Image (tube, rainbow, N blue to C red):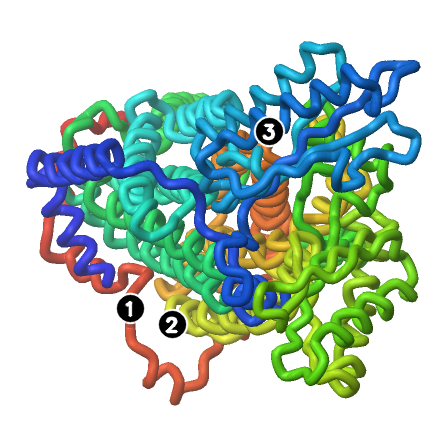
């Protein structure tokens, strides 16, 4: 592979005009497609194989036109002090609002609070519900604007009015200011690492082009493939991070090759052949982790993972082709690595020669920070390993108290009208009113459907944590009915989850007695089923992703213990990251620092999402760092010296890459959407733990303790595995047949 990529890098360097033209044309084509594509809402939310989804599908069949999965909007009214909602003026305001809401083209029904008993017992709070024929994220903007305008008109009469429900859901705001700050920090890190504005600009430019192609393609296909706003957000987040990192590694290796005296075309080819090989395998691990989300069998997650994986593929291709081409344009503006340090060293050599002539000893050159750190770890591997493992283990402790759920209006900031409407309903009708359960009774096979409906309703009334059970509402055929149950607890509480399981626990007895099937659905039940499905899929997903990546790393490192150590280190870092997420978003520790106004259960998809994304990114650092160690080892260095060599060449770049990723992910913490904020924080803290604790401390400590055993591979397996030559062994033969390039004229002769 190294030889092929070497030739590809040299070809891109020579044909740079053609290469850049192709990528610019692809960006333009994707941009035109995105601009001309019809607007799309979000991917439809369905959970195949769950009871809640089965109930929704049954409702679509037995109640045609009822739009069981349609959006719901609520306008909540509160009377001024010393007034009641039953006063004549307030009733007139509510009636006017109900009439205005009924004029919408997507409206199915609007309830009158005075005929549906939707006024609180003390008469101070009332609400009207609006049902629509499409899900919340598919509502037209004009429909959503009409709902908000109706609330604003009622508010002008002196009532306290707030609007809630999933009808107000909109695309996730990505926090443009935070992203700009993240990119600015990334630019500063690149300048410090690469030493020039031109060298720092290349990774940023190519990453933006790659993300532009990926996100524009997703936008262009959004309507056809039912892709949502969150899909492009994930692609943007991952694409920026890996695009900058992959380009950084190739540019850094290019400068290192220049420092060894090679010509610029030769240096570009060798940088693509060596660092580019690591980029390919690092990208493969990310793609495996993201595409593996299909195992969960949730269409929304599958589409998000595949779209982000496609953006990563684009980032890899750009790093292998456009970066060498841009290096050709940069010319002499990108200088060899450590050129300033070498100039200082030359001055010291001169001084040393003069000192020797004078009889005074000179000081040896000081090794860089990576060399000093690796040497320290090798001297005390057991202590460093113990400290790293124990430290991450302590941080992971909160993960044992992990509570999963999906965000609702109760998790919104108190400044939003959705949250205020949620609180008003809780105040007037109880916390469970925000999460009603819908019971679907299928009595098609029952001899007496009416008796079956009544039996189910009576059985639910006797359960704990039930406040209200509405009379059964049968369909026209009389074989199916719906019953609404109001719990006593808020939707995200464990008491409500226990109630759902209790109702489902009665279904077997009811079916035996009446031949009727009882299904529990509604938003609250759907969230509970979604969380359970993700929990059940976590272990199979982890086994698949880690297993495939383990096999891939065996091919890359030609070792058994190094990939095993990489996988165990990842598990440690992701558990610590989950612990930090629980501490901040569930327990509220330091929540104010990142703008978390409301704590609560962790988003259901967070654990499995972090496993997928963080595993791919963690393997990036493993591949980039350890391949340099492997390269030194196969070229004859001792195991300990190979660790030091790997850190001397790669530690600075890996640290810079980690800081860049943290900056990019951290930029999303500023998003107003709680899901995006949680994802940004979780990924940023996971990168910190994995890069600075696992890869920088635990990895060299383990390799120092293992010695030569780290690189052991059974002979039969060694013969069976393909030789991908990530270390660039095939390029060493070129040293004997090709001159290093016209770099001698730049060297300064020092008289001795």
70 w.r.t. 213: above or below: below
Residue 325 visible here: no
Where residue 395 sits: x, y (%)? 76, 49
The part of the image, by quadrant, that contains residue 337 is top left
Label 2: few (<14), some (14–19) or many (≥20) C-alpha neighbours in 10 Å: many
| Whether residue 150 is situated above or below residue 470 in the rendered picture | above
Numbered disc 2: secondary structure:
helix
Q: Quadrant of the N terminus?
A: bottom left
The first of marks 1 and 3 along the sequence is 3
Residue drawn 42% across the image and 25% down it: 187
Q: Is residue 334 visible?
A: yes
Find out whether the residues at labels 1 and 3 contact each other: C-beta distance under 8 Å: no
Q: Secondary structure at mark 1?
A: loop
Look at mark 1 in the image and give the residue it sits on. Answer: 724
Q: Residue 516 — which label?
A: none
Q: Mark 1 against mark 3, which lies toward the viewer?
A: 3
**Precedes in sequence: disc 2 or disc 1:** 2
In the image, residue 520 sits, relative to residue 191, either above or below, namely below
Query: Which percent across, then down, holds residue 47?
Result: 54, 63
Q: Are marks 2 and 1 in contact (CB under 8 Å)?
A: yes
Q: Is residue 64 left or right of residue 741?
A: right
- Which of the pair 745/50 is nearer the observer? 50
Question: Residue 672 — which label?
Answer: 3
Tag 3: Cα neighbours inside 10 Å, few (<14), some, or many (≥20)?
some
The image quarter in which residue 683 lies: top right
The percent position of residue 462, horizontal first and vertical second, equals: 92, 66
Residue wearing tag 2: 555
- In front of the other: 294 or 562: 294
Q: Disc 1 to disc 3, how far (Cα)?
A: 45 Å
Looking at the picture, how far across and down is residue 34, in whole percent?
26, 36
């Amino acid at each position: 592979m190294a030889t092929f990529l070497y030739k590809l890098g040299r070809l891109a360097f020579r044909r740079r005009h053609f290469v850049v033209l192709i990528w610019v044309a692809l960006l333009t084509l994707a941009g035109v497609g995105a601009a001309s594509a019809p607007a799309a809402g979000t991917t439809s939310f369905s959970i195949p194989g769950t009871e809640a989804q089965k109930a929704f599908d049954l409702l679509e069949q037995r109640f045609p036109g009822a739009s069981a999965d349609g959006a719901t909007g609520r306008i909540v009214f509160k009377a001024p002090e010393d007034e009641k909602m039953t006063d004549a003026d307030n009733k007139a305001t509510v009636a006017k609002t109900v009439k205005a809401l009924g004029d919408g083209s997507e409206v199915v029904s609007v309830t009158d609070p005075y005929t549906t008993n939707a006024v609180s017992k003390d008469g101070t709070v009332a609400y009207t519900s609006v049902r629509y024929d499409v899900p919340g994220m598919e509502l037209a903007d004009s429909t959503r604007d009409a709902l908000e305008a109706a609330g604003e008109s009622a508010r002008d009469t002196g009532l306290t009015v707030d609007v809630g429900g999933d009808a107000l859901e909109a695309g996730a705001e990505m926090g443009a200011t935070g992203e700009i700050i993240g990119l600015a920090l990334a630019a500063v890190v690149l300048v410090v690492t690469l030493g020039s504005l031109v060298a720092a600009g290349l990774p940023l430019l190519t990453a933006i082009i790659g993300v532009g192609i990926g996100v524009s393609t997703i936008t262009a296909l959004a309507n056809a493939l039912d892709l949502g706003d969150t899909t492009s957000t994930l692609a943007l987040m991952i694409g920026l991070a890996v695009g900058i990192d992959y380009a950084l590694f190739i540019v850094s290796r290019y400068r290192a090759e220049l420092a060894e005296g090679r010509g610029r075309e030769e240096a570009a080819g060798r940088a693509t052949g060596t660092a580019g090989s690591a980029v390919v395998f690092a990208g493969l691990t990310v793609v495996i982790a993201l595409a593996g989300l299909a195992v969960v069998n949730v269409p929304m997650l599958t589409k998000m993972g595949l779209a982000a994986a496609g953006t990563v593929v684009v980032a890899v291709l750009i790093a292998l082709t456009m970066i060498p081409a841009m290096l050709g344009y940069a010319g002499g503006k990108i200088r060899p690595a450590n050129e300033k340090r070498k100039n200082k060293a030359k001055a010291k050599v001169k001084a040393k020669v003069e000192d020797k002539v004078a009889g005074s000893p000179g000081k040896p050159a000081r090794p860089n920070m990576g060399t000093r750190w690796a040497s320290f770890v090798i001297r005390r591997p057991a202590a460093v390993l113990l400290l790293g493992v124990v430290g991450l283990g302590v941080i992971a402790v909160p993960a044992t108290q992990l509570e999963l759920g999906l965000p609702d209006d109760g998790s919104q900031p108190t400044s939003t009208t959705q949250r205020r409407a949620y609180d008003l309903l809780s105040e007037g009708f109880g916390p469970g009113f925000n999460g009603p359960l819908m019971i679907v009774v299928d009595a098609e096979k029952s001899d007496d459907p009416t008796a079956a409906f009544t039996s189910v309703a009576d059985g639910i009334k006797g359960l704990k944590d039930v406040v209200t059970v509405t009379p059964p509402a049968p369909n026209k055929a009389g074989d199916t009915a719906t019953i609404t149950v109001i719990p006593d607890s808020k939707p995200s509480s464990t008491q409500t989850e226990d109630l759902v399981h209790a109702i489902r626990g009665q279904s077997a007895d009811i079916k035996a007695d009446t031949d009727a099937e009882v299904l529990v659905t509604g938003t609250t039940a759907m969230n509970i089923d979604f969380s359970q499905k993700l929990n059940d899929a976590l272990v199979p997903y982890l086994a698949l992703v880690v297993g495939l990546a383990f096999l891939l790393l065996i091919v890359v490192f030609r070792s058994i213990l190094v990939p095993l150590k990489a996988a165990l280190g990842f598990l440690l870092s992701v558990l610590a990251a989950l612990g930090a997420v629980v501490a901040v978003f569930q327990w509220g520790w330091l929540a104010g620092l990142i703008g978390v106004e409301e704590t609560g259960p962790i988003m259901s998809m967070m654990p499995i999402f972090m496993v997928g994304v963080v595993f791919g990114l963690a393997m990036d650092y493993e591949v980039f760092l350890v391949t340099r160690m492997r390269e030194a080892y196969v070229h004859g260095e001792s195991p300990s010296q190979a660790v030091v060599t790997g850190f001397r060449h790669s530690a600075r770049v890996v640290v810079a890459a980690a800081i860049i990723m943290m900056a990019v992910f951290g930029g999303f913490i500023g998003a107003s959407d709680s899901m995006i904020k949680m994802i940004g924080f979780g990924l940023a803290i996971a990168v910190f733990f994995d890069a600075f604790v696992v890869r920088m401390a635990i990895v060299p400590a383990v390799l120092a303790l293992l010695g030569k055993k780290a690189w052991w591979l059974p002979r039969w397996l060694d013969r069976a595995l393909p030789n991908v030559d990530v270390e660039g062994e095939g390029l060493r033969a070129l040293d004997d047949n090709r001159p290093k390039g016209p770099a001698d004229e730049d060297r300064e002769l020092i008289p001795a």
